[in-house]
Image (tube, grey):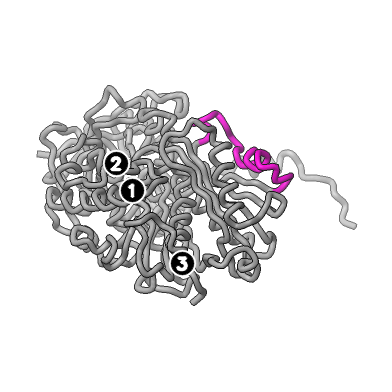
Amino acid sequence: MRDVAIIGVGHTKFGRASKTSLELFSEASLQAMDDAGVVGKDIEALFQGAALPGFEEGQVMPAAFSAAELNLGPIPATRYEGACASATVAIRDAAMWVSSGDCDMVLAGGVEKALTMGTAFATRTFAMSCHTPTEGPVGLTFPGVFAMAARRYSKEYDIPLDSLREKMAHVSIKNHGHGALNPMAQFYKKMGNLKVEDVVNSMMVADPLTLMDCCPFSDGAAALVLCPVEDARKYTDDPVYVLGTGQGSGSSLSKMADLTKPVSRIQSAKVAFKHARLEPKDIDILELHDCFTIAELIALECLGFFGWGEAAEATAQGETDIGGKIPTNMSGGLMGKGHPIGATGASQVYWMVKQMRGEAAKGNQIDPVPEYGMTDTLGGDFGTLCHIILGRTRK
Amino acid sequence: MKKMVGKEQEEIEKELSKEYVALTYADYEEGLKAGKLLGLKCAACGGITCHPMPVCQWCSDRRLEKIELSGEGEVTTFTVIRVASEGFEDDVPYIPCLVKTKEGPCVVGWLDFDAESVSQDVIGKQVKMSGIHTYNGDKFFSGEHVCPVFKVME
């Protein structure tokens, strides 16, 4: 098995797009190919995350047409579906194909046009990655699932719900703060100075989560070029190594032993750390799946950055912001940057690469540049989890 | 060289007739409509599986027998949905909950409680299945589907 590096990255503006999914993915792909200094005939396979293209544009099999749009020739092109973790699963498989020796250069990424669907229909289609036979008739929504997790968190760790809501608000304040500084973010120059009251008093979506506890629906795409490490320096002075990956699957909500400790995430992260031969203390920066404020707290604990029940207070104390123990979602995360679900995992990797090159936006770039970073992407109600650990060197 | 004559149709049909599911979702939903919470008891570990699965949810054994649960349990968490997905707009506000049954497995359903006064205090309360909620389905999930509704026991 060969070590794999990322040599080029691309990212569209997140928000509302008038372009088609094919155009968005092409835009991100061409940026990534230009960044790597490669051309279409160099690409041997395409791996595309896309969760709901059939509902957004009536388009199934978008990966093949994405390859065709770029004149990549009759190469293998595959769509990956893991709900909101689709792109990370695609990137993980892309890295494996390169690692196995089957391909020497591939394109991986993701695309989504969720905002185009409108809130009611988008909520319906997102809820399709709940367990339909049991959760469908209940009318569960994703905010609903995470609201249930927040209430469990409050109960388990004996944190009064009002106090937990105030601590959770700091996730939204931080991530919107960084999203407002990111020109590619859906909320660039918006909501950069939220107060706790702004979050807890905004419209109730699923009690106790308000609108400001939730990430938005978004359109956008992101893409990467991957090749074996031994070839990487032919293309770039700053290759980023894929040091470890993990993937895990969960169950229906009712079969989960504990909503605040999803085993799918714990197991996936453990495998990624083992492959990378690293531990949480080695990681300098995180991009993790803050679909809801409570989701960021649960993720920080499952990944091993804080003890059980400790991430809420640590976040309120600034431990997850610049200068803290572990800067988290300096891109703005899903909340500030936007969440085009099929593209999100690729966007997380994009911003990790930018951080490692010292090219993140002013106010979001950490100093010194990170040596090791990790992405965490969650699909469904803990149904698909995927992690990627990246580094500027192989430890 | 081995001579290839194919397999008798009757033998293939016999293979097809083997049943892998002791309680189907359709039967589970029919049970709910009749006011019964149905599940499966495992001959290997004695554990109860509910909602149904083809294997025991605790030990993966396949020797499962259909049983009726008491419908009683404890609320472990809930939420009040104010922004619904398409098809549930008229139900807002409604209260999805998770109930840990007396027999062990958790089930997801609705809580019959006033949405304006429900609070964190309801977690840990004993409940009993009091009825069902019927979802009329849509073009993606067609037909009527039901979930259990639970009420706090006084």
Instruction: Tell me, yes or no, if residue B67 can be seen here.
Output: no
Graded by Cα atoms within 10 Å as few (under 14), some (14 to 19) or many (20 or more), the crowding at tag 1 reads many
**Residue assigned mark 3:** A271
Residue B147 included in the magenta stretch of the image: no
Disc number for residue B32? none
Which residue is pictured at 38% across the width and 50% down the height? A382
Instruction: Give whichever of A32, A138 is nearer the camera.
Output: A32
Q: Which of marks 1 and 3 is in front?
A: 1
Which stretch did the figure color magenta? A53-75
Residue lying at 42% horizontally and 59% vertically, measured from the top left: A375
Q: Is residue B60 above or below residue B65?
A: below
Q: Along the polypeptide, which appears first: circle 2 or circle 3?
A: 2
Q: Mark 1 points at which residue?
A: A179
At mark 3, the secondary structure is helix
Q: Mark 1 lies on which chain?
A: A
Q: What residue type is labelled 3?
A: Val
Give the secondary structure at mark 1. Answer: helix
